[in-house]
Image (tube, grey):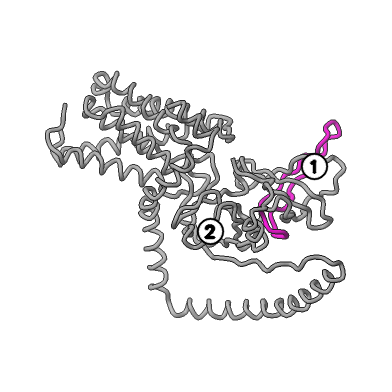
Amino acid sequence: MMVLILIGIYTPWLKDTRQKLNFLTTPFYQVTDIPRRIGEWGNSVFTSEKDLRAENERLKIEVLIYQRKQQQMAALAAENVRLRQLLNGKDMLQDKVLIAELIGVSPNPLSHIVMINRGSREGVYEGQPVLDAFGLMGQVVEVDEEISRVLLISDSTHAIPVQVNRNGVRAIAEGTGDLNRLSLRHVSINADIREGDVLVSSGLGDRFPVGYPVAEVEQVVRNSGQAFARVIARPMARLDRSRHVLLVFDTHNQANSEQGASPAPAVRPE
Amino acid sequence: MIPHHWNSYLVILASFAVAFVLAVYPLPMEWRWWRPEFVLLVAIFWISVFPLTISLFFLCFLGLFQDLLEGVPFGQHSLSLVIVSYICILSYQRVRNFALWKESCWVFVLVGLAQLPDNWVQSMTGRPLAGLLFLAPAFSSALIWPLLRMLLDRISRHYRIT
């Protein structure tokens, strides 16, 4: 048994077996999903007209606001393309997304892994970035036919390359095993990072796309006796509350892997 | 202490299936520590009823299945399940004479013991744990044990599993 454990942890030999046997576990997660489905069905059937009207009003207003922003966006995007052409840079690629729903949380209290209801059938792949409406949530680590598992950025085995949105200072944000804390690794003591800075994904490591918000710096402790500052950040994504998540298909990455020239990712789940 | 009827086996398997569902039922992230170890509790109960029938081999496979279900390294749960079951098999004659609250205390010890290999494996995968939080499942398991015990007693009486 101990040998099995050691093999499972230190070698990838058992990964295939696990992948093949995973279909056995799907029914259990589907059973635990039933109460939620009933609740959702109940919500959609028993809603009062008044509530619907109010919601409709609110949504219309929101659409107006977003339309206004969209108009600006078009102009800004065009300007961005022109500037990029001036700089001889590559065009920004529009990312394709797929909406998925959370159906389970890993029962192991030490790991921050959630299950979503999309799998290889919809084209989900390992290492795919996952977002919610507020920021980056994590990446896919295991893909089944209908279910995949997502490692959240707060897991203590996860790290993500980030940069400060204000000035582009780069760092690596590590999970701490606490849902509301990430810690930045090896930030030199005189680096320009302040409380309230927004950290966005830097795209280094070729795993996460550039420019999605990851966390907000909460606390910076500079102890002159130490070489590195201690920086604590709070994830922007609502890691424990979001129900709907977005799977991003990074067109740039896929093209790379098709050529078989995908560079080794800097961020690897263990 | 050997079940005569094939339906006893069915009931045992069904109870484990329900325990597996409860073991993966999604809980909010911070509350997951307080989930009782249902599979272990059900195993402890059936061992006290049929100490000679529930084989360690069967329990080992149950543990492996739980590992697969929870996505933890293979062997983590089966190791703790087998260790605890062995202790149960050695001690069932004494434990049968305990009062219910004493049994609860015993369950607390057993589940706490099962947490040790669990945390050992988890810290090898890079998720170390500090503090006494690992005793939380043992605590909740001990609290829920009287309820589970009465429920399973009733079920086994209803299906005449003796």
At 16% from the left and 28% from the top, the residue drawn is B2
Count of numbered marks? 2
Mark 2: secondary structure = loop
Tell me residue A215's x, y (percent).
70, 53
At 42% from the left and 33% from the top, the residue drawn is B77
Residue A224 on the magenta segment: yes
**What is the quadrant of residue A76 in the picture?**
bottom right
- In this rendering, position of residue A17 left or right of residue B58: right
Residue span colored magenta: A207-235
Q: Nearer the viewer, residue A151 or B133?
A: A151
Residue A124 badge: 2
Residue B132 badge: none
Instruction: State which quarter of the image contains the C terminus of chain A.
Output: top right
Q: Nearer the viewer, residue B90 or A1?
A: A1
Mark 1: secondary structure = strand
Q: Is residue A96 above or below residue A55?
A: above
* Amino acid type, label 2: Val
- In this rendering, position of residue B55 left or right of residue A176: left
Q: What distance separates the C-alpha of mark 2 from that of mark 1?
A: 34 Å
User: Nearer the observer, disc 2 or disc 1?
Assistant: 2
* Circle 1 residue: A187
Q: Nearer the viewer, residue A32 or B36?
A: A32
Residue A160 on the magenta segment: no
Rate crowding at label 2 as few (under 14), some (14 to 19) or many (20 or more) other CA atoms within 10 Å: many
- In this rendering, position of residue A253 left or right of residue A38: right
Tell me residue B143's x, y (percent).
37, 35
Tell me residue B147's x, y (percent).
30, 38
